[in-house]
Image: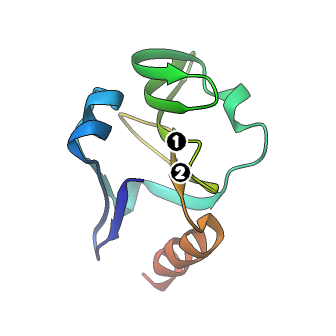
Amino acid sequence: MPEIELKDDEIVVRLSFWQRLAAVHGDLHIPATSIRGAAVADRDWLKTIGFRVPGTALPGLIIAGTYIKPKDSTFIYWTRRSPSVLQLNLSGRPYNRVFIGVDDAAALADQINDALTAC
C-alpha cells in the first residue's frame, strides 16, 4: 500500500518503485488548498472512474494509474490486499479525485478532515 504522509501544507502519497511502475506515475503531492474533503469510498467507486490512460488494471488484483472521463480526472492505487479505499475530493488540476487503498480509510479520512477544519 502507498504511504500517506500528512503535512501542514500538503498530503504526500509515496509510491514504492513497483507501485510507480504499475501506476506509471511518481509520488503525489497534493496541496492542502486543493483538498475539499476525504471519505471512505462507496462500494460502487469503480463504476465512476472512466478510462485508464496510463496505468495498470488486472480486474480483482490491481487498479493503478490515471483514469479520465469528460470533466473528471482520477488517480487510483488499489490492490486486493487493501481492506478499504480512501477517497480524496480535490479542486483544481491535475486530478478531481484520488482513490488510495489503505488499512483504515475511515480513521484516515477523519484525520484529514479534522486537519482541514483546524486551518
Tell me where residue 64 sits by quadrant.
Answer: top left
Depth check: 41 or 69 in front? 41
Residue 62, percent from left and from top: 51, 32
| Circle 1 residue | 78
Q: Which residue corresponds to the image point at 27% horizontal and 37% vertical from the top-left? A: 18
Check the image and report above or below for 60 versus 108: above
Query: Given the image, on which type of amino acid does mark 1 rest?
Result: Trp
Check the image and report above or below for 57 versus 101: above
Residue 47, percent from left and from top: 73, 26
Direction from residue 85 to residue 19 in the image, left or right: left
Q: Which residue corresponds to the image point at 34% horizontal and 61% vertical from the top-left? A: 3
Residue 2, percent from left and from top: 37, 53
Where disc 1 sits, the SS reads: strand
Where disc 2 sits, the SS reads: strand
Check the image and report above or below for 96 versus 69: below
Query: Given the image, on which type of amino acid does mark 2 rest?
Result: Gly
- Do residues under tags 1 and 2 come within 8 Å of each other at their CB atoms? yes
| Circle 2 residue | 101
Q: Residues within 10 Å of mark 2 (few under 14, many from 20)?
A: many
